[in-house]
Image (cartoon, rainbow, N blue to C red):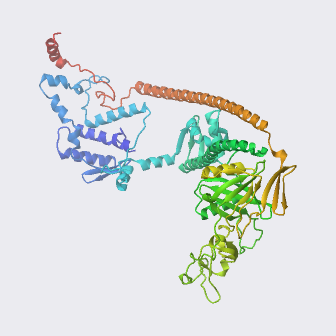
Amino acid sequence: VVCDLIEGKGPPPGIFFILDDTIKTMHSQHGDGVDLTFLEKMARVHKGHAHFSKRGRQFEIKHYAGNVQYSVLGFGEANKENVMALVHQSSNKLIQYLFHQTNEEGDESHPGRKKLALTAGTKIRTQCAALVAALMDCQPHYVRCIKSNDRKQPHNIDDKRVLHQIQYLGLLENVKVRRAGYAYRGDYGRFLDRFKWLAKETSREFSGKDAAGCKCIVKAAQKAIPALQDEVQWGQTMLFIRTPEAFFALEKLRERTFGVFVSRIQRAWTKYAGRRHLLQLSADISKLYAKQGKGRQRVSLYRPFDTDYCRDSQVRAAILAVLQYHGDDTAKLLFCDNVDKISKLGIRQPNFYLVVTGSAMYILEGQAPASSVDPKAIVPPLVSLRRRLPLSAIEGIVMSPFADPFLVLRITQTPVLPTPDVSHWKDNKSSASCMATNKKFSLFTRRHHCRVTGNLYCADVVSNLHPVPDRGCYTPVRVVDSVVGYFSTDMAEDVCLASEKKTEIAVVIVNALRTISITFDKAIRLRTAPVLSTSPSDTLTFETGAATAITVRPGNIVITVAAADQVPAQYLEARKKRERRRKKQRDAQRAADEAIRTARREVREKEREEERLRRVAEKKARKASERAKRSGSGTNLATNGANVRKFGEQLAQPQSNATSELAAALARRRGN
């Protein structure tokens, strides 16, 4: 609309045509009269136009980027091209030769008719039309440059300056236009490459058509974005999405999918890196086993080292809560799995968890889920901490020479405190109310110190009684409900554990400490604590038999190991050879698969490039046909623009009879 207002041929005629008409009818006049007449004609012709208004001696045009006011003073003189008129009136033959006056020659399309005087408005219209025609023959791309501030300082954004540029560059209008149509327009190949991870069919290696792959992606994405079903339109070579909200939802879904992939990759890499390192350490400990004559179990040979074996999400969350309570949640997790513990009476107790981090070792006991439905009842945690030990408290590892799952951890014992430690208790006057319920203390509401935290609570939240050996409380005492299961309740003493992953546990601990050693003995005596001991004080004696069993005898606990569990040495050597052969086969298969994928990618890229070139050729042919139609119609871009050099056209040498004499003189001077 604004372009027609400025340069339209009409009806009604545009501003440039009104200006040319005013100059033609008032060519002999000068001064402000011409400008005011031009203003009055514009106001009369474009009265009521939505983008035009008269304001005194000015007129205002509502452009695409904003409103602009123009003063009419000087329009007439600027449009007359006075400089060129004076040059054409020169009597100097050289000036006439250089600046020949072609607008006085006859019009080829209308013989005998003189061409009209060329004005500045005509030049602008003709050159703009030629520029637009040249741009239409290409595929232009525009880059909007935003100046952040006027002081040329980095990391400094002037909000008003940036907003002004956005407004007058028309970026907001561009967004509105995009919203009015389709927010996303993309080739099938580009859409497939960007969003192929959203569908199982296209995430790995898709060999079908790009359009079929895009349909698989949209179908899979509709499960998370139901509105996508009505937002997508399918073209011959492109996919269209109507609203930006749908496209943004698709991008967020892609980000979430990548987040899942990143988590899997991190876990896989951690597992791979840890397994690679642990396998090297396992090879070293296997040499130690062979040197000491230690038997190997069949189940330990085919088990990979995964470090973290906890698959129950609720148990994992409970363990993480314990680690977080002790500030160990950000440490590297070295090992986590179920283990059995040999009790004081020589009974193999299941449902224990061993967690080893970069700084400490945790022995936790699993609890049965609460069956009470009373919302006021205290729900015990799924796991309770029995003992937390810094890794430096582990002095050594002892194993039997047989193929059994048992190992003994030598632990540095802590001395027994003569009296409970109350140094962390809060003063009775520091709080007049319960720190958990805000219930005020009184004669009937007594204050109680939690032996773990030292804070003041009422009896409603300190109903649990547990020993706190780290504070010297070796009998059950009051602790607040919120810390139950988070503090140690056992003494630091030697412990005997049973696990099929004993080799991995030993490797992890030895690699973390580097100062302890692994010893082997058929008779092991544990160093137990004088109070609150949960480990057997009798000697553990290992022997082989028909079946695995634990027999308690006076002063001795006999652990019988099944002889059938031990793997022969010949089998171990044959297994190593098979593993090496399988590794070579896997590497060869992996290389062949990668070659096939590379070839498929090359074929797909070649097909896409051929399709792109075909579309470009069709577009060029279509534009050439349109140009041929325009040139064959005999219509000019402007009525008086035949003598104006078009965009990209070379300047032709002038041919004039009036300058033939000067041309002949110059030729003689050159010796021709």
How far across and down, in percent of the image, does residue 304 sit?
A: 71, 44
Query: Quadrant where the C terminus lies?
Result: top left
Q: Can residue 49 be seen in this view?
A: no
At 42% from the left edge and 28% from the top edge, which residue is drawn?
Answer: 630
At 69% from the left edge and 77% from the top edge, which residue is drawn?
Answer: 463
The quarter holding residue 7 reads top left
How far across and down, in percent of the image, does residue 67 sit?
A: 34, 51
User: Is residue 269 or residue 221 the one in the foreground?
Assistant: 269
Q: Residue furthest left?
A: 91
User: Is residue 457 or residue 50 the one in the foreground?
Assistant: 457
How far across and down, in percent of the image, does residue 276 sit?
A: 64, 42
User: Is residue 141 or residue 643 the one in the foreground?
Assistant: 141
Q: Which residue lies furthest to the right in this view?
A: 546
- Would you place residue 394 above or below residue 609 in this image? below
The quarter holding residue 104 reads top left
How far across and down, in percent of the image, does residue 663 sit?
A: 17, 16
At 15% from the left edge and 15% from the top edge, which residue is drawn?
Answer: 666
Q: Can residue 300 be seen in this view?
A: yes
Count of labels shown? 0
Left or right, 320 with reference to 302: left
User: Is residue 332 or residue 415 the one in the foreground?
Assistant: 415
Left or right, 503 with reference to 61: right
Left or right, 365 with reference to 628: right
